[in-house]
Image: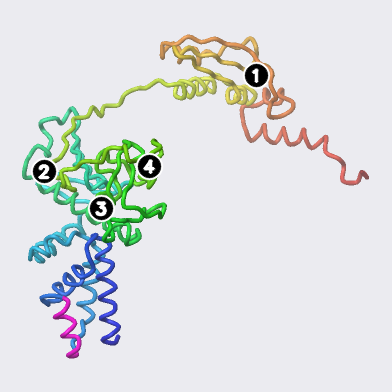
Amino acid sequence: MTEATKLSNLKRLAKRYARANRITLHQALDLVAEKLGFANWTKLASASKKDWIPDSEQMASIKAFVARALPAADFQAGHPEAMTRRFAYLEQAEHGMIGGHVYRLQVALHDVIMVGDGWSITVPENPGAAPIVETSTENDGKSPVFDPEFLREALSLTIDRAAQVRGEISTDWPRRSTKPDLDGVVRHPLRGGESGVWFCLHCDRKIAGTQIAQNLWHCPGCGASPLDIFDTAFSCDDGGESLPSVRTNGAVDSDKPDFRVVDDRPKLDLNEEKITLLIRCALLDDATNISEKLGALQAQISVDDENGVWISLEEDLWPQDKEPIQALIVAAQLGIEVELESMWSTIPFAWPGLGELTSSTTEYTQMMLDAYAQYEPSPDKKK
């Protein structure tokens, strides 16, 4: 690889880092130079004119540095060794242990979630949202998240991982979506329109282009996602002039966690879908042959607002004089009343009586195929 090619690759990697971290290109170039032992990019460029070129190990280190896409703040403050340790920590972070407590780290829809026994920490995709710390009622007061040292380390890990995720998002978006021009104009990362003023469809407020770009296109006021951000104020006729502006205190990241105690015990919600499922399952218990099984599957089951149940059974598939005993028992267990009725509808197969001769689906299928075959045209018969 030639000197010019390697220098060009370094610039390309620096550009990617700048996009991921929403900083200027010259800042990213200086950070890359510092990573390679130079005071700034100018010094690196001067050295390259004197036959210096990065070796393969140095190029690999820069690629790894850019791939992690962590904020540049610590490097700008002169702490590259601390950031290197954080990089190594994150590489092993999908499963781990803090102070004897096992955790699992995962990313779901761009939210970073750390989960342990009876507790979790969620850092939302929205940079302006506070981390959410949840414990179950059984672990309230006994959870490790109430230990300041444990919480500090766990939050540091999840926040660093969230910075990586946000960096990946920024890299995928157009550069103008995260870097306003001199007039504050930015481009919507999903729809592509450009404007210096944006409107939140969720809270009906207007947002400056610099604000929305800084907050990764989440409303700084209500936290609405980029899907709710438009360059047009649909709720008013004056182009949004009368809408109030979003007010923020200037801080984008909020590290102070929001503690929540949740009751995660299983709760039975007997809605229409679940009642119908249990009743149909009980009808299948009542069925003694294939005809009745088909009747149980074809039955129309409806549930009213007070959880009363109507069961309509096909007359040709379910005997009129047969009570669905198991279905009635299940209904009694659930504390609901049942109304039974017969109905006439189109049955799935002819000769429903065939299903009364067997309880085996394979045997019934063959009987049904043989019966239909008797009515197929003979291959020797002319049409």
Task: Find the distance from the CA under tag 1 to the CA under tag 3.
Answer: 65 Å
What secondary structure is marked by label 4?
loop
Q: Earlier in the sequence, mark 4 or mark 2?
A: 2
**Label number found at residue 239:** 4
Q: Is disc 3 placed on a helix, strand or loop? A: helix
Q: Amino acid at mark 4?
A: Gly
Q: Residue at x 18, y 32 (%)?
A: 260
Q: Nearer the viewer, mark 4 or mark 2?
A: 4
Observer-side mark, 1 or 3, equals: 3
Indicate left or right for 308 with 317 as reference. left
Q: Which residue is mark 1?
A: 314
Q: Which residue is mark 2?
A: 151
Q: CA distance from mark 3 to mark 4?
A: 19 Å
Residue at 17% across / 45% down in the picture? 102
Q: Amino acid at mark 3?
A: Thr
Q: Can you identify the residue that label 3 sits on?
A: 210
Determine whether label 3 and label 4 are within 8 Å by CB: no
Q: Nearer the viewer, mark 3 or mark 4?
A: 4
Answer with mark 2 or mark 3, whichever residue precedes in sequence: 2
